[in-house]
Image: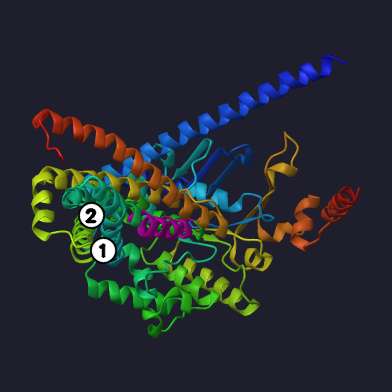
């Protein structure tokens, strides 16, 4: 009676180790594969830039078409910040400092992260779905068969569009957030305009604005690489395309937050090195 | 010296597949396939769906890398070529995909001109002339040039795919199931176009098909691939290699079943599957 359960326990333990091992190996292979994909993209980008007619539609899609949604998101998040901070700050008698908190949160964190999230949702998923469909319908193979390199023709323009246009989207999200925050705080909550701007100016500097824009380059690169990689490695059928689009957004978003944390720590260390006294709200 | 090297080149097969194995995960698709295609020949690769015909075609052009074995095109080992060299060599191929694989976002004209634009060797007016010429060659009017692939019928899409494959004057044409999904008349049109292409451009052709009319009408030579899963471990995967006329007189039951379109033991297997499910 005792023999078989022991064997079965050992067998299921072995199975568990095998399964986890397979998951770890798959993960390592995927990361390695993504690394090679990035290297090939950069190599083609440095060798020869894509033609204008392949670059411009991507720049238009990423930059121009994303502007309205990014502007709208930025405006609302500025106003939401004002709504959420007002109660707490009023209790402390610091409501005139709202401008500092809202604008600092926007330019350092929320502007870049929200612009990147919107880009991942709007453009990243579309890229993965488009490239996935091209993979499934053999259009990527057709490109290769005609002497065009799919990485050079499809990935490099999308990478460049995301890399160079996400900072402008970030600036737009920052600007609209500042406008939204100002509108709600000053026009709706009735905080004094002069104090609002004076505290903002005291607390938020060019360094903060630039640190947000600096981060956005990494977010743009991550979105383009993850989305194109998922599209290129799409599984067959409509389900495969759907999964690629979803995975592109989910992985991009997770990576955006990871990069944000890592760069946030790094940027704070740089800030503390150059301005050890800092600026206080009080 | 130059004469002898030209003769040697003529004698070298354009395509040589040597003991190629292709495995996807744990699934073996090609097992020890060896095949040579001399210059000027039209070879039909036949076999049932899922036997690895398309994978073999993609291995020949380097779109699928063999797990083991060699593929030589005009003496070049494709596995040894860099990304850029492989891209250069591929201009010498013309590939007609099963569903044409036209770029949805481009017009018919842009699709056909695509290979020329990539090479940037012709002026826009020359490209336009060549596109019109190739479209006329496959029997399509000029008016089709501004249409999107989604606006075309299946037969027209295949013909646009053929025009696009021909635009670079390739040395090797690869056709992946060119008549699948077409009505008998359009199938015959495609067969005629393949014959005409061979005559006009003096190309070597490899046609993957399970349409026996295509094999009989267009090919000089036929090879048949059998699915690895149905073979014994020592059996070769190429179960027939001969002229189209020899297909009917072949002694291999599997070849005759395919040529005559007989389900044979597949029916027994299906019944067995149903019985197993009921149990």
**Residue B219 left/right relative to A156:** right
Picture coordinates of residue B208 (x, y %)?
A: 59, 58
Main SS category, magenta section: helix
- Secondary structure of residue under mark 1: helix
Q: Is B270 in front, or is A14?
A: A14
Q: Earlier in the sequence, mark 2 or mark 1?
A: 1
**Residue A204 pos. (x, y %):** 13, 46
Task: Say if the magenta span includes residue A168.
Answer: no
User: Relative to A55, does residue B129 appear above or below in the rendering?
Assistant: below
Q: Quadrant of residue A266?
A: top left
Residue in view at x 25 percent, y 60 percent: A55
Res. B36 mark? none
Which quadrant is the N terminus of chain A positioned in? top right
* Image location (x, y in percent) of residue B93: 42, 56
Q: Quadrant of residue A195?
A: bottom left
User: Left or right: where does residue A271 sit relative to residue B138?
Assistant: left
Judging by the rendered image, the residue that carries numbered circle 1 is A71
Which SS class for mark 2?
helix
On screen, residue A56 versus residue B239, left or right, reads left
Residue position for label 2: A170
A121 magenta-colored = yes
How crowded pointer 2 is (Cα within 10 Å; few <14, some 14-19, many 20+) is rated as many
Magenta residues? A119-135
């Amino acid at each position: 009676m005792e023999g078989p359960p022991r064997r079965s326990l050992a067998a299921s333990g072995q199975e568990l180790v095998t399964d986890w091992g397979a998951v770890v190996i798959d993960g390592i292979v995927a990361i390695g594969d993504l690394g090679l994909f990035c290297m090939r993209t950069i190599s083609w980008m440095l060798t020869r830039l894509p033609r204008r007619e392949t670059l411009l539609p991507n720049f238009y899609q990423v930059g121009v078409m994303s502007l309205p949604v990014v502007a709208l998101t930025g405006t609302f998040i500025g106003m939401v910040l004002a709504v959420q901070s007002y109660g707490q700050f009023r209790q402390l008698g610091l409501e005139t400092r709202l401008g500092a908190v809202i604008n600092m949160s926007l330019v350092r964190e929320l502007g870049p992260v929200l612009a990147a999230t919107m880009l991942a949702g709007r453009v990243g998923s579309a890229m993965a779905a488009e490239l996935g469909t091209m993979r499934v319908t053999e259009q990527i193979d057709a490109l290769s068969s005609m002497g065009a390199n799919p990485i050079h023709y499809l990935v490099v323009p999308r990478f460049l569009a995301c890399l160079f246009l996400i900072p402008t989207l970030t600036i737009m999200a920052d600007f609209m957030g500042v406008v939204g925050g100002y509108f709600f705080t000053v026009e709706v909550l009735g905080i004094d305009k002069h104090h609002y701007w004076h505290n903002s100016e005291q607390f938020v500097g060019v360094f903060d604005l630039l640190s947000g824009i600096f981060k956005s380059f990494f977010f743009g690169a991550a979105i383009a690489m993850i989305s194109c990689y998922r599209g290129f490695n799409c599984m067959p059928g409509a389900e495969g395309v759907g999964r690629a689009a979803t995975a592109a957004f989910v992985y991009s978003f997770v990576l955006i937050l990871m990069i944000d944390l890592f760069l946030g720590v790094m940027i704070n260390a740089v800030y503390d090195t150059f301005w050890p006294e800092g600026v206080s709200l009080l | 010296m130059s004469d002898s090297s030209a003769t040697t080149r003529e004698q070298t097969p354009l395509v040589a597949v040597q003991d190629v194995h292709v495995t996807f995960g744990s699934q073996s698709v090609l097992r020890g396939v060896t095949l040579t295609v001399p210059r000027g020949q039209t070879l039909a690769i036949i076999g049932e769906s899922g036997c690895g015909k398309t994978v073999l075609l993609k291995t020949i052009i380097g779109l699928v890398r063999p797990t083991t074995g060699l593929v030589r095109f005009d003496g070049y080992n494709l596995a040894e070529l860099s990304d850029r060299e492989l891209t250069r060599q591929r201009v010498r191929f013309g590939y007609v995909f099963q569903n044409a694989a036209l770029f949805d976002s481009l017009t018919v004209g842009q699709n056909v001109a695509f290979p020329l634009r990539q090479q940037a060797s012709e002026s826009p007016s020359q490209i336009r002339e060549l596109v019109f010429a190739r479209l006329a060659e496959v029997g399509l009017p000029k008016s089709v040039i501004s249409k999107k692939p989604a606006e075309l019928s299946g037969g027209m899409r295949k013909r646009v795919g053929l025009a696009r494959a021909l635009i670079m004057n390739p040395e090797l044409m690869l056709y992946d199931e060119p008549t699948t999904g077409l009505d008998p008349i359009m199938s015959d049109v495609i067969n005629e176009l393949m014959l005409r292409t061979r005559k006009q451009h003096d190309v070597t052709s490899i046609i993957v098909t399970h349409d026996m009319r295509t094999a009989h009408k267009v090919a000089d030579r036929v090879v048949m691939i059998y699915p690895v899963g149905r073979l014994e471990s020592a059996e070769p995967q190429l179960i027939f290699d001969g002229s189209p006329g020899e297909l009917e007189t072949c002694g291999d039951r599997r070849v005759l079943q395919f040529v005559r379109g007989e389900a044979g033991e597949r029916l027994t297997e299906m019944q067995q599957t149903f019985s197993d499910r009921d149990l």
